[in-house]
Image: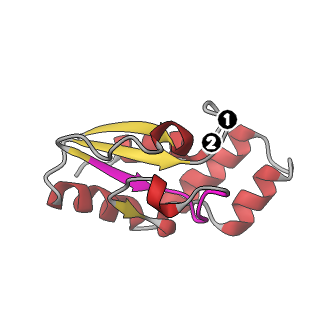
Amino acid sequence: MRIELGRVRDLLDDGGSADGEHRVLVDRLWPRGIAKERLAYDAWDKDIAPSPELRKAFHAGELDFEQFREHYLGELSDSDAPRRLLEAAADAEASTIVLVYAAKDVEHNHARVLREALDALDV
């Protein structure tokens, strides 16, 4: 299964998932300033997002991206949420998962780390 990333702002009003695509919003909080009707997604998986404590520490600058990455990978390895996400996509007969996130920084965000963790799973 292919795993892609999609920024919320880039997916607004785009008509929704393409054939074989399963879009999953992977933020714990709804994206600020976005009306729910404007974002087409198939699932919202709050459980797969970083813990509130980890998210707050990263955004406050208490952790650099590499430290955040290590902590988040640890959270993901202690959880069955990544496997459940992949299974849900398989149940939807998707060939592609799009991890939808709201972060402005396209290089340093939790969706990139999540894709890394999902790629490492053998499902």
Please name the predominant secondary structure of the magenta segment in the image. Answer: loop
Please tell me in which quadrant of the rendered image residue 21 appears: top left
Vertically, is 54 above or below 10? below
- First to last magenta residue range: 22-32
**Residue of label 1:** 105
Q: Looking at the picture, how far across and down is residue 54, in whole percent?
A: 71, 60
Q: Is residue 28 magenta-colored?
A: yes
Can residue 67 be seen in the rendering of this structure? yes
Crowding near the residue tagged with mark 2, few <14, some 14–19, many ≥20 C-alpha atoms within 10 Å: some
Disc 2 vs disc 1: which is toward the camera?
Answer: 1
Helix, strand or loop at mark 2 = loop
Q: Looking at the picture, how far across and down is residue 88, in whole percent?
A: 25, 62
Q: Looking at the picture, how far across and down is residue 7, in whole percent?
A: 52, 40
Tag 2: residue type?
Asn
Per the model, the C-alpha gap separating discs 2 and 1 is 6 Å
Q: Is residue 120 left or right of residue 29?
A: left
Q: Is residue 123 magenta-colored?
A: no
Q: Are marks 2 and 1 in contact (CB under 8 Å)?
A: yes
Q: Looking at the picture, how far across and down is residue 94, in whole percent?
A: 19, 48
Name which residue lies at 17% across and 58% down.
92
Near-viewer residue (32 or 15):
15
Crowding near the residue tagged with mark 1, few <14, some 14–19, many ≥20 C-alpha atoms within 10 Å: few
Name which residue lies at 18% across and 55% down.
90
Helix, strand or loop at mark 1 = loop
Near-viewer residue (111 or 113):
111
Tag 1: residue type?
Asp
Q: Which mark is residue 109?
A: 2
Name which residue lies at 32% across and 48% down.
121
The image quadrant where one finds the N terminus is top left
